[in-house]
């Protein structure tokens, strides 16, 4: 058995969640774009603006291509991991005679990991229902606005003021005749981009049963409270769905890995990343097996957190799984008596204890070089996205593809940061 710090062999596992999240997000973008395009094509009276349909098709094709690319890269990394997972001694010692089976029924706890898989699948269904409700809300809002345009009373009003707000939506203030010779005033959300001027006549459409409900031919004037509620629901639904799918996939892999390797008893210490380095990463879990070998794990992002367990250093626990798919099983949590499973992944391979080494100047210089390059590439990427957004809004006057730019801008730094972290953990190389 060979123990060592083979960092290069374990670097590729860090990309697993990145590709999975990318595939989900780009798939949702493609699905949303396709649904919006189909609705526009089938909606009576809807007219595409110049270049709008081409922009929709370009967004769909690009989103599908990126989704398939993430899937292909994820499958490639999974194949590269297969050989490592087949060698559990890289992370776990050989089974010993005493594993603490009497204190905790390890077979039952292995089976309970499957419950966490089912719980994550249930959350996936919940977030899908949330997204379906949000989609229905957007559809109902659009249908209500279209219904008002078709059945409302059309009158000629006048623009009394045009207001651009630093905070909130721009508005136009109009007066229009309604009812038996009376006049009404209304603030209408100005989101079409069409220019208006004071004193300009404008066609106003109002509901004969509720004259205060009003729109124009171009401005839908939807309820902004409901609109923001739907937007927040959309963001929460997409984020929750991505995290739930990742959790379900990862817990399934951990369950299969633990079932294949079994548990190893060990002494563990939870080391949170504060107060000195607050907010940089999840807590580390230092593991010392009974044979004296050590390994450092890092708690994965999960509702099963490890920070509350920091108050008991060198406490007994069990370790199962391999590589990215590892679980630390504590006899009990801080506030609960049943055994408590914390997901984790290995930062290195199992090794004998080593004395602390002095900082390597060459490694320090290497980190600084990589940091400068990371900042440059990160800034250039956002500059390119901002330029793309300006082209879409100003030159092509398209707003829907801007959502795709925002999504890419939000998730593009993730693989870049993963690559940056992987390079920092690699050995310094001469340039």
Image (cartoon, helix red, strand yellow):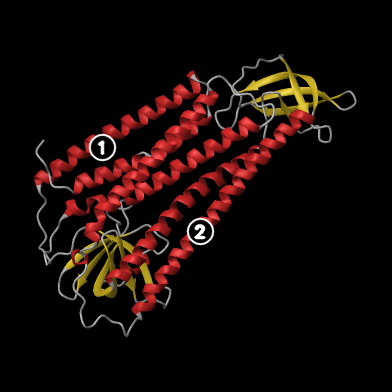
Q: Residue at x 84, y 35 (%)?
A: 209
The N terminus - image quarter: bottom left
Q: Earlier in the sequence, mark 2 or mark 1?
A: 2
Between the residue at mark 2 and the residue at mark 1, the CA separation in whole angstroms equals 35 Å
| On screen, residue 238 above or below 312 | above
- Whether pointer 2 and pointer 1 mark residues with C-beta atoms closer than 8 Å, the reply is no
| On screen, residue 267 above or below 326 | below
Q: Residues within 10 Å of mark 2 (few under 14, many from 20)?
A: some
Q: Say which quarter of the image contains residue 4.
A: bottom left
The answer to whether one can see residue 225 in this image is no
| Nearer to us in this view, 13 or 267 | 13
Q: Nearer the viewer, mark 2 or mark 1?
A: 2
Q: Secondary structure at mark 1?
A: helix
Q: Which residue is mark 2?
A: 123
Q: Residue at x 20, y 44 (%)?
A: 423
Q: Residue at x 39, y 62 (%)?
A: 251
The C terminus - image quarter: top left
Q: Position of residue 260 (x, y in %)?
A: 29, 69
| On screen, residue 299 above or below 66 | below
Q: Say which quarter of the image contains residue 343.
A: bottom left
Q: Position of residue 182 (x, y in %)?
A: 86, 25
Q: Position of residue 183 (x, y in %)?
A: 83, 24
Q: Secondary structure at mark 2?
A: helix
The answer to whether one can see residue 164 in this image is yes
Q: Which residue is mark 1?
A: 374
The number of numbered discs placed on residues in the rendered structure image is 2
Q: Is residue 401 left or right of residue 416?
A: right
| On screen, residue 403 above or below 424 | above
Q: Residue at x 20, y 79 (%)?
A: 96
């Amino acid at each position: 058995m060979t123990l060592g710090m083979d960092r290069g062999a374990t670097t590729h596992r860090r990309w697993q969640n990145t590709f999975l999240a990318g595939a989900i997000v780009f798939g949702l973008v493609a699905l949303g774009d396709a649904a919006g395009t189909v609705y526009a094509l089938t909606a009576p009276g809807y007219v595409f603006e110049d270049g709008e349909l081409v922009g929709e098709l370009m967004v769909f094709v690009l989103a599908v291509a990126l989704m398939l690319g993430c899937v292909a890269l994820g499958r490639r990394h999974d194949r590269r991991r297969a050989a490592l997972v087949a060698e559990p001694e890289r992370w776990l010692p050989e089974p010993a005679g005493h594993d603490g089976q009497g204190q905790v029924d390890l077979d039952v706890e292995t089976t309970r990991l499957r419950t966490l898989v089912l719980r994550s699948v249930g959350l996936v269904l919940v977030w899908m229902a949330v997204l379906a409700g949000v989609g229905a809300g957007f559809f109902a809002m659009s249908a209500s606005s279209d219904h008002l345009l078709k059945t409302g009373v059309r009158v000629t009003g006048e623009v009394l003021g045009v207001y651009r707000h630093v905070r909130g939506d721009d508005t136009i203030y109009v007066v229009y005749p309604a009812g038996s010779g009376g006049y009404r005033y209304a603030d209408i959300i100005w989101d079409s981009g069409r220019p208006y001027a004071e004193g300009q006549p404008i066609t106003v459409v109002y509901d004969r049963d509720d004259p205060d409900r009003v729109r124009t031919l171009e401005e839908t004037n939807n309820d902004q409270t409901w609109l923001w509620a739907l937007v927040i629901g959309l963001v929460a639904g997409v984020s929750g769905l991505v995290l739930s799918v990742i959790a379900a996939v990862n817990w399934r892999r951990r369950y299969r890995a633990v079932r294949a390797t079994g548990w190893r008893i060990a002494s563990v210490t939870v080391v949170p990343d504060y107060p000195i380095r607050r907010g940089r990463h999840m807590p580390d879990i230092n593991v010392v097996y009974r044979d004296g070998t050590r390994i450092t794990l890092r708690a994965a992002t999960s509702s099963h957190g490890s920070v509350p367990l920091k108050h008991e250093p060198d406490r007994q626990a069990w370790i199962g799984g391999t590589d990215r798919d590892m679980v630390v099983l504590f006899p009990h949590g801080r506030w609960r008596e049943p055994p408590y499973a914390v997901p984790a992944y290995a930062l290195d391979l199992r090794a004998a204890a080593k004395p602390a080494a002095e900082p390597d100047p060459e490694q320090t210089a290497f980190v600084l070089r990589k940091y400068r390059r990371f900042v440059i590439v990160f800034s250039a990427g956002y500059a390119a996205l901002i330029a793309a957004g300006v082209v879409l809004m100003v030159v092509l006057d398209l707003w829907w593809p801007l959502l795709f730019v925002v999504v890419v801008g939000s998730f593009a730094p993730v693989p870049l940061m993963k690559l940056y972290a992987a390079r920092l953990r690699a050995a310094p190389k001469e340039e």
